[in-house]
Amino acid sequence: MSEKLLDVTNLHVSYGAIKAIKGISLHVNRGEVVTILGANGAGKTTTLRTLSGLLKPVEGSIVFDGNDITKTPPHEIVSLGMSHSPEGRRVFGTLSVEENLMMGAFSLKKYDQATLDWIYEILPRLKERTQQLAGTLSGGEQQMLAIGRAIMSKPKLLILDEPSLGLAPVLVKVIFKAIREIAKSGVTVLLVEQNARAALKLADRGYVLELGKISHEDTSEALLGSQAIQEAYLGKK
Ligand code: ATP
């Protein structure tokens, strides 16, 4: 079994004539938390959507858990063990919290009570609201639900796109604590975040994306200590 759970080589992705991703290579080892940082429009969401099969690259390869998934449809990628919690949450508004969580597992026949109980343990706000319609949850609660739903399928790799976007600092802390717990349980995590400092504190390694190319890659510690990264992405402490 390869140490690399995800191995991306020379990925190119275009929207018609617009080249959004221009030859990136990256990997995520089993058990790691890896973050992708970058300014608006750098190509972070495009990268994640390509990994989970929603966009197809014009060039390059994606290997996940030993399988070449470059041309694999999204539902098959999910069943191989990759779960993607998209930017903008996208919960099922007319279903209850608990029904949303179950949706994360049923199609894969992976539902189990222990996982549901564990989600309620790490995201207690959801437990207080099991019967509430998801559409009436606050933005932060919907984000928690989207993460919980992604975990219900017991993924090998959890992909999170901007989990803290638009949330108040106190909720950002709750979300990051939950991600830490998820990682501690053995799930490998690939995280895209605007909140670069918090993401690097959580992650083992990071990649910086600039205009569709990787400009830096290093351990989180080295990136946090780099003057160029501090000036461009971390601002003042
Ligand atoms: P943000 O942090 O703002 O979400 P991002 O790093 O996730 O940014 P992407 O959304 O991946 O960036 O966008 C990368 C580039 O691709 C941008 O120039 C964007 O305008 C372009 N792009 C994204 N989606 C489309 C689309 N559907 N059609 C055309 N161009 C697109």
Image (tube, helix red, strand yellow):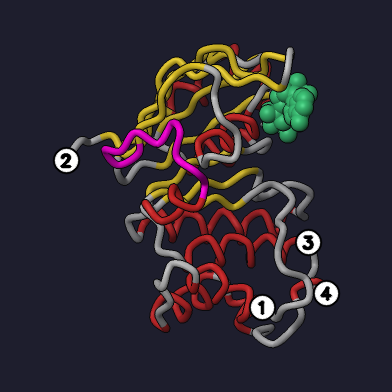
Point out residue 150 in the picture as x, y percentages from the top left corner: 53, 60
In which quarter of the view is residue 49 placed?
A: top right
Front-most of 149 and 208? Answer: 149
Q: Earlier in the sequence, mark 2 or mark 4?
A: 2
Locate the C terminus and report the quarter of the image it occupies.
top right
User: Does dot 3 land on a helix, a strand or a loop?
Assistant: helix
Q: Amino acid at mark 1?
A: Val
Q: Residue at x 70, y 81 (%)?
A: 96
Residue tagged by mark 3?
139
Q: Amino acid at mark 3?
A: Gly
Q: Residues within 10 Å of mark 3 (few under 14, many from 20)?
A: some
Q: Residue at x 49, y 77 (%)?
A: 121
Tag nearer the camera, 3 or 4: 4
- In the image, residue 195 sits, relative to residue 140, either above or below, namely above
Point out residue 211 in the picture as x, y percentages from the top left corner: 67, 14
Tag nearer the camera, 3 or 2: 2
User: Does dot 4 land on a helix, a strand or a loop?
Assistant: helix
Residue tagged by mark 1?
97
Residue tagged by mark 2?
1
Locate the N terminus and report the quarter of the image it occupies.
top left
Residue 236 visible in the shown view: no
Residue tagged by mark 4?
136
Task: Look at the image and give the residue range highlighted in magenta.
Answer: 64-74
Q: In 3D space, how far apart are the residues under numbered discs 3 and 2 (Cα atoms)?
A: 39 Å
Front-most of 41 and 19? Answer: 19
